[in-house]
Amino acid sequence: MATTMSAGEFLALHDRTEHPDPLVLPNAWDAVSARALADAGFAALSTSSVAVAAVLGYRDGGDTPADEMFGALKRITRAVDVPVTADIEAGYGLAPAEIVERLLDAGLVGCNLEDSVDRQLKDPDEHADWLSQVRAAAGDRLVLNARVDTFLVGDRSVEDAVKRAALYIDAGADVIYPIFAPESALPELTSGIPRPVNAVCVLGQSTPAHLHTLGASRVTYGGSLQFHIANEITALAQRIAQ
């Protein structure tokens, strides 16, 4: 199976002005999880780099070989008939044109690209230039979600996040993802960023509907779904062993 939805149609799903809820993209990590999420009725899916890396036996943070990551992503898209956007960290050292080629070959409609490497923020102007090269190679074939890591490894200020977002939007980003921004900062962030904003939902701590009231147009779960399943498997294994 594979989706026939174009990147433009996928991007249109981010317009939530007449919707009571945001676009919820739960994060899959393999074909089984992707099928379960698609069968539950979600209109589209995301992936989680940390979750896929764990399944492949690697740590998150760019350690996963590109061939293995894109192979896993291709298996996920092949398993479902809804659009899938992928978390590909900082691009695994690939040139922009190759990133685009591999994403399209894997059947993806979009990707996350983050602005930190080895837990260090990249120069925002240099990152914007790099994003512009990705956009030039992709044209209108991919939805680019620019992750802003200032709340993860930066000064945690709304001002810095908005400044970076402006540069990335000028470079061609369609969506901005200020990962781990506190809920208290979302109204100011979303009012200062003229593109859909992606917020991460922490299981048991928030809900997509609540994040939508704070301005988020798109909600993902990061690696938390896979972490939950891994904990369940650990508990089951311990019960079996006993």
Image (cartoon, grey):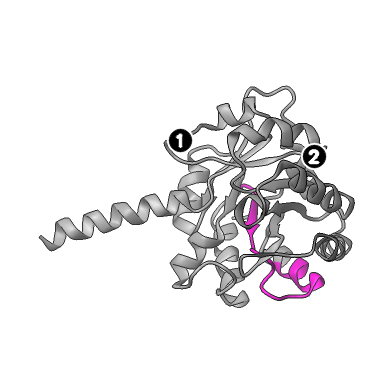
Identify the residue position indicated by label 1 in the image.
205
Asked whether, in this view, residue 46 is left or right of residue 58, the answer is: right
Q: Residue at x 45, y 47 (%)?
A: 36
**Lateral position of residue 12 relative to residue 201, left or right:** right
Residue type indicated by callout 1: Gln
**Residue 195: image tag:** 2
The disc at residue 152 is none
Q: Position of residue 159 (x, y in %)?
A: 77, 43
Which residue is nearer to you in this view: 88 or 76? 88
Q: Is residue 91 magenta?
A: yes
The relative height of residue 123 versus residue 98 in the rendered view (above or below) is: above
Residues at marks 1 and 2, CA–CA distance in whole angstroms? 25 Å
Residue 1 percent location from the top left of the image: 59, 55
- Mark 2 is on which residue type? Arg
Q: Residues within 10 Å of mark 2 (few under 14, many from 20)?
A: some
Q: Secondary structure at mark 2?
A: loop
Highlighted range, magenta: 82-102
Residue 153 in view, yes or no:
yes
Q: In screen coordinates, is 14 left or right of 55?
A: right
Q: Is residue 170 magenta?
A: no
Q: Is residue 226 above or below residue 73?
A: above
Name the mark nearer the viewer: 1 or 2: 1
Q: Secondary structure at mark 1?
A: loop
Say whether disc 1 or disc 2 marks the residue closer to the N-terminus.
Answer: 2
